[in-house]
């Protein structure tokens, strides 16, 4: 523990660098995946192409993609943007499927009722489909956040600061304390992200919270069953 206390500044700076790599990828991944997922939910052909492409992209090893990005975009190899772009690709690959499933879960009768009431396509999306797809989208974002935080550790392999630096340095020096410190830091950061995203989801979707409370209240209410037969 003495090593941890004496290196708190390094742990904190590495954590901030890790967050800086992950947050843009998670936010942009969500923003890009929602319209793509909506398109995939409306078109069988688009769903097949997008989900297959996502599966292929996700099979690319992280270090290979981080090295490939600067080659394709002409960026310096040590530019943190390379890692963020690679993480964005992975985030979209995961989130598109979640978004497609989220919009596909919206009941067709609900859409039909909204159209019958004169909702335009934009109103139907923003006021009906997106709110109803919200819980599934939130679950997808939480998965993406954990995956992104984990994958961001590969940044250390190309010399970009992140919590992964504790793994590489610890293995090189056979120093278990540093490796465990990096592991715990990544786990804690993933937990914090999950809690924060969950709180944001609750704030943006109060109707979902009310629905859960109503369901809990209904489950606690039991109707007495009349006894039959003589005793």
Image: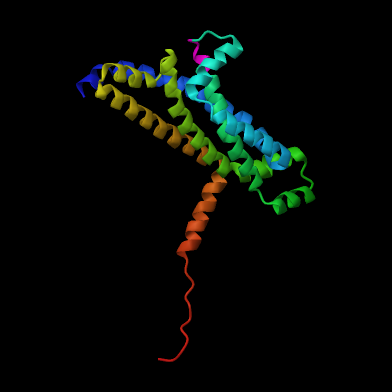
Residue 98: x and y in percent read: 58, 39
Residue 227: x and y in percent read: 46, 83
Q: Quadrant of the C terminus?
A: bottom left
Q: Residue furthest left?
A: 2
The number of numbered discs placed on residues in the rendered structure image is 0
Q: Which residues are magenta?
A: 78-82
Residue 149: x and y in percent read: 44, 28
Q: Residue at x 54, y 44 (%)?
A: 206
Specify whether residue 27 is in view: no
Query: Within the magenta stretch, is there residue 79?
Result: yes
- Asked whether, in this view, residue 52 is left or right of residue 66, the answer is right
Q: Nearer the viewer, residue 17 or 122?
A: 17
Q: Residue at x 40, y 34 (%)?
A: 191
Q: Residue at x 30, y 19 (%)?
A: 170
Q: Is residue 7 above or below residue 35?
A: above
Query: Within the magenta stretch, is there residue 69?
Result: no
- Asked whether, in this view, residue 51 is left or right of residue 84, the answer is right
Residue 50 figure quarter: top right
Q: Is residue 137 above or below residue 71?
A: below
Q: Residue at x 35, y 19 (%)?
A: 168
Q: Nearer the viewer, residue 230 or 92?
A: 92
């Amino acid at each position: 523990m003495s090593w941890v206390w004496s290196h708190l500044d390094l742990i904190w700076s590495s954590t901030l660098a890790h967050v800086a790599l992950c947050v843009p990828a998670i936010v942009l991944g969500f923003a890009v995946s929602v319209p793509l997922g909506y398109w995939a939910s409306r078109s069988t052909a688009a769903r097949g192409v997008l989900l297959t492409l996502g599966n292929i992209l996700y099979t690319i090893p992280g270090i290979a993609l981080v090295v490939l990005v600067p080659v394709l975009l002409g960026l310096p190899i040590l530019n943190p943007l390379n890692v963020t772009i690679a993480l964005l690709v992975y985030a979209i690959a995961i989130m598109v499927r979640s978004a497609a499933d989220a919009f596909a879960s919206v009941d067709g009768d609900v859409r039909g009722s909204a159209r019958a009431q004169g909702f335009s396509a934009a109103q139907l999306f923003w006021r009906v489909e997106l709110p109803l797809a919200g819980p599934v989208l939130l679950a997808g974002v939480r998965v993406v956040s954990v995956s992104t935080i984990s994958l961001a550790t590969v940044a250390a392999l190309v010399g970009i600061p992140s919590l992964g630096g504790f793994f590489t340095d610890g293995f090189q020096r056979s120093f278990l304390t540093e490796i465990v410190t990096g592991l715990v830091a990544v786990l804690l950061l993933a937990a914090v992200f999950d809690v924060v995203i969950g709180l944001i989801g609750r704030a943006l979707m109060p109707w979902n919270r009310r629905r859960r409370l109503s369901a809990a209240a209904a489950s606690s209410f039991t109707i007495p069953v009349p006894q039959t037969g003589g005793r």
